Image (cartoon, coloured by chain):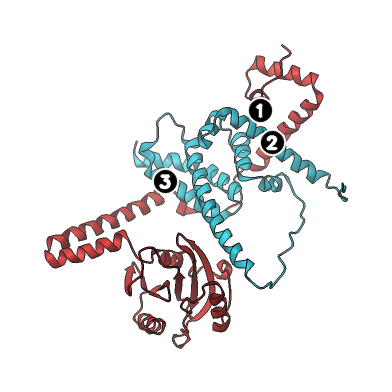
């Protein structure tokens, strides 16, 4: 009868999960070992306190985006887009040589979209307020010397003030190739352009190119041993501006 | 099972998932992101769920894994940041942490996330030891010893809170 209860039994006793005879055995043991009893009773009180304080719903606002039906709808939409893309590719393969070639290009782009990390960074951090930046400055001098310190030799963030865009800050991002930086510009309307720099990927030099993803357009290339990209909302004036900026970098 | 009944079952678990995520991340926005990715995963994996698995521990297991991988990502980011800040000229002293009166909640917040999860699962959510063992993929004996350590840690911090020494004894 006077056996030392196992760890399991002690914890189950605290949680009220022991069957009656074992519970009595633990009670008996604790009566003989007041120090252990003190500890176990304190654990019980702590658990009660946690339950009392935490079992209510914390004071966080309702979030309709978390409703399962909404999440399901978003997943369906993503799936539909993927099917649409696949159907389009099949169609162009059917359309013959040129179509097939085009489809191959699309397929390549879908499998290995260049600078996908730049677009992801834009989506995550653009228009998100200054709280997320690792370096905040509106001055090109500060910005360039900061970038120069951390990304030696990398293309400098170009001056886009002619088009009304001013730098807001820099966010560092960990990528599989090493540290990347995203410089964010905004204009008076709150439209954002990002300038993204990262070490080159193993695939080698990135040829100049453009990709469109929904309402975003990305212009990318390589310079001085870095890959870089501009990401912005699609807008003809902005595109012209970005083309100029690209020319100044290469 | 129709989508509708699945959604109803998930909806029923939503408050406790949010609550758990909230105490785990200590950040309302981060908690909701975590819950969202948990639900996305749960929906896409619904059919691979063994019928015997109860919904609640299954969802907690997904949430816990999502939390760990998000934390790995943010650790990578923090390491990166540290490395960069080391080369930064000193601009401002690091903000002093204010000493504030702490309750059991505050103390709980300071425990490592696994101890926090354990205490929440067992004491608040009422999961069985077996369910916790399955979530963490560890033997039940290990659950018990970790639970014991978590309770000791909580107790120690609470005691430290109650009689905060004004002088530290120097050895």
Tell if the residue under mark 2 belongs to the same chain as the one under mark 3.
yes
Residue A97, image x and y in percent?
Answer: 12, 65
* Secondary element at image label 2: helix
Q: In this view, does A10 lie above or below A127?
A: above
Q: Distance between the residues labelled 1 and 2?
A: 9 Å
Q: In this view, does B66 lie above or below A36?
A: below
The residue wearing badge 1 is A11
Of callouts 2 and 3, which one flags the residue occurring earlier in the amino acid sequence? 3
The disc label shown at residue B41, or none = 3
Q: Is residue A215 above or below residue B128?
A: below
Chain letter, disc 3 residue: B
Q: State whether discs 3 and 1 lie on one chain.
A: no
Tell me where residue B50 sits by quadrant. Answer: top left
Could you classify mark 1 by the number of other residues whose Cα lies within 10 Å: few (under 14), some (14-19), or many (20 or more)?
Answer: many
In the current view of this chain or complex, which residue is farthest to the top? A1
Q: Which corner quadrant holds the C terminus of chain A?
A: bottom left
Mark 1: which secondary structure? helix
Residue at x 35%, y 38% (from the top left corner): B47
The residue drawn where x is 51% and y is 35% is: B137
Chain letter belonging to callout 2: B
Instruction: Give the side of residue B51 with respect to residue B16, left or right.
Output: left
Residue B154 in view: yes
Q: Where is residue B44 in the image (x, y as percent from the top left)?
A: 37, 45
Q: Which mark is residue A189?
A: none
Question: In the rendering, at what x and y percent does residue A110 appear?
Answer: 30, 61
């Amino acid at each position: 009868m006077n056996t030392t209860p196992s760890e399991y039994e002690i914890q189950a006793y605290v949680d009220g999960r022991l069957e009656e005879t074992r519970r009595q055995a633990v009670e008996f043991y604790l009566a003989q070992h007041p120090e252990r009893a003190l500890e176990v009773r304190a654990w019980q009180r702590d658990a009660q306190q946690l339950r009392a304080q935490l079992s209510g719903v914390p004071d966080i606002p309702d979030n309709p985006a978390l409703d399962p039906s909404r999440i399901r709808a978003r997943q369906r939409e993503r799936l539909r887009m993927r099917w649409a893309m696949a159907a389009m590719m099949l169609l162009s393969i059917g359309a013959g040589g040129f179509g097939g070639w085009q489809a191959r290009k699309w397929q390549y782009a879908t499998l290995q979209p260049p600078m996908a990390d730049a677009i992801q960074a834009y989506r995550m951090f653009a228009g998100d307020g200054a709280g997320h930046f690792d370096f905040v400055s509106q001055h090109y001098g500060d910005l360039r010397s900061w970038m120069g310190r951390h990304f030696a030799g990398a293309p400098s963030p170009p001056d886009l003030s002619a088009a009304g865009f001013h730098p807001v800050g820099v966010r560092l991002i960990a990528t599989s190739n090493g540290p990347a930086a995203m410089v964010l510009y905004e204009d008076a309307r709150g439209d954002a352009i990002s300038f993204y720099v990262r070490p080159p990927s193993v695939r080698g030099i990135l040829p100049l190119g453009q990709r469109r993803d929904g309402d975003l357009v990305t212009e990318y290339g390589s310079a001085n041993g870095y890959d870089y990209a501009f990401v912005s909302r699609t807008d003809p004036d902005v595109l012209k501006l970005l083309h100029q900026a690209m020319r100044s970098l290469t | 099972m129709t989508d509708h009944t699945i959604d109803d079952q998930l909806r029923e678990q939503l408050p406790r998932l949010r609550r758990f995520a909230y105490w785990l991340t200590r950040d309302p926005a981060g908690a909701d992101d975590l819950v969202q990715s948990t639900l996305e995963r749960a929906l896409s994996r619904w059919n691979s769920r063994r019928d015997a698995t109860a919904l609640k521990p299954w969802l907690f297991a997904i949430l816990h894994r999502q939390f760990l991988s998000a934390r790995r990502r943010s650790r990578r980011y923090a390491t990166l940041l540290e490395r960069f800040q080391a080369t930064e000229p000193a601009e401002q002293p690091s903000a002093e942490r204010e000493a504030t009166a702490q309750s059991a909640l505050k103390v709980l917040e300071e425990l490592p996330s696994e101890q926090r999860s354990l205490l929440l699962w067992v004491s608040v959510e009422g999961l069985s030891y077996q369910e916790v063992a399955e979530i963490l993929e560890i033997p039940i004996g290990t659950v018990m010893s970790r639970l014991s350590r978590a309770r000791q840690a909580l107790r120690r911090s609470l005691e430290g809170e109650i009689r905060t020494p004004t002088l530290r004894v120097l050895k």
